[in-house]
Image (cartoon, grey):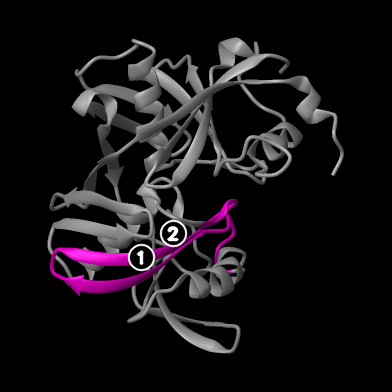
Amino acid sequence: MNNTIFTKYHALGNDYIVINPADISSDYLETDQIKRICHRNFGIGSDGILLGPLNSTDCDFGLRIYNPDGSEAEKSGNGLRMFARYLWDKGLVDNTPFTVETLGGTVSCEIRANGKNVKVEMGKVSFNSTDIPVIGPSREMLNEEIEISGRLLKFCAATVGNPHCVVLTESPTPEMACHLGPLLETNTHFPNRTNVQFMKIIDRHNIQIEIWERGAGYTLASGSSSTAAAAVALKLDLCDSDVTVHMPGGEIELQFDNGFSAVMTGPVTKVFDGIINNEMFEWAF
């Protein structure tokens, strides 16, 4: 990867590095490379890597999304907005909607405000345990109980192409997310692990969440987490179909139709372009 060009973006403090596969002559990254690049002391530092654009037979572009631990994510709402901005910056798209293929399904993106705001059709949210997946008989994952660290929690689960566990609480805090999040992420209820959101209902159009992201840890913002949490709030009739999700990094707007298909709109910020030097991978830690 010597002298590989990359671009770094953030979406409400959730930062990703975009690498064009043409620059590394490969459609994948090795686990050790991913861990090193994402490391905030020994590498560039990020919440993940977006590898694209890739060829796709069904969509305009293909995309692979990597977590800092080297695992691959099915979908990332923030990641998709950042990837859309990258395509805009490179002159590969205009204001016309375009499609992106991810492991979690096809999404449609639309550039707004000269790339500084992006609309993403996230697809249909499912609450079915088989789709998510969650162990046990097939059922809607609403208001179930789970014991974690001596606490009995009530949770719901959903998928927007990747798994989510939503815990309702009156006082979501970073400390709660960092303590209970990793325990829920790796709980045996979730065979593919899970993203975790601790959600407070503010009113019919506003919710607040703290996020523990699978494979990444505590996160300031997440598009797929926002979508899942807002969908749960709507499913429980705790909010309406237009929802603003408040996170430590900022706000994302969600709109749902009657079938729980979600449209997400939020900002993207370009941070910098850089060059990866191979010497970064030589240092052992």
**Which part of the image, by quadrant, shows the N terminus?**
top right
| Residue at image point 63% right, 35% down | 44
Q: Secondary structure at mark 2?
A: strand
The amino acid type found where label 1 is placed reads: Ile
Dot 1: within a 10 Å radius of its alpha carbon, few (fewer than 14), some, or many (20 or more) residues? Answer: many
Dot 2: within a 10 Å radius of its alpha carbon, few (fewer than 14), some, or many (20 or more) residues? Answer: many
- Disc 1 vs disc 2: which is toward the camera? 1
Is 78 in the magenta? no
**Which part of the image, by quadrant, shows the C terminus?**
top right
Q: Quick check: can you spot residue 107?
A: yes
In the depicted structure, whether residue 201 falls above or below residue 193:
below
Tell me, for residue 164, which label it has, or none. 2
Tell me, for residue 126, which label it has, or none. none
Q: Is residue 10 left or right of residue 35?
A: left
Q: Is residue 219 left or right of residue 258?
A: right
In the depicted structure, whether residue 118 falls above or below residue 122:
above
Q: Main secondary structure of the magenta part?
A: strand
Part of the protein shown in magenta? 189-218
| Residue at image point 31% right, 53% down | 250
Instruction: Measuring from the top left, give residue 193's x and y in whole percent.
Output: 57, 58
Q: Quadrant of residue 208?
A: bottom left
For the image, the number of numbered tags is 2
N-terminal-most mark, 1 or 2:
2
The amino acid type found where label 2 is placed reads: His
Q: Is residue 7 left or right of residue 111?
A: right
* Residue situated in front as seen by the camera: 65 or 190: 65
Spatial CA distance of label 1 from label 2 is 13 Å
Instruction: Measuring from the top left, give residue 6's x and y in whole percent.
Output: 56, 22
Q: Quadrant of residue 241?
A: bottom left
Instruction: Measuring from the top left, give residue 151's x and y in whole percent.
Output: 53, 88
Q: Which residue is mark 1?
A: 209
In the depicted structure, whether residue 240 falls above or below residue 92:
below
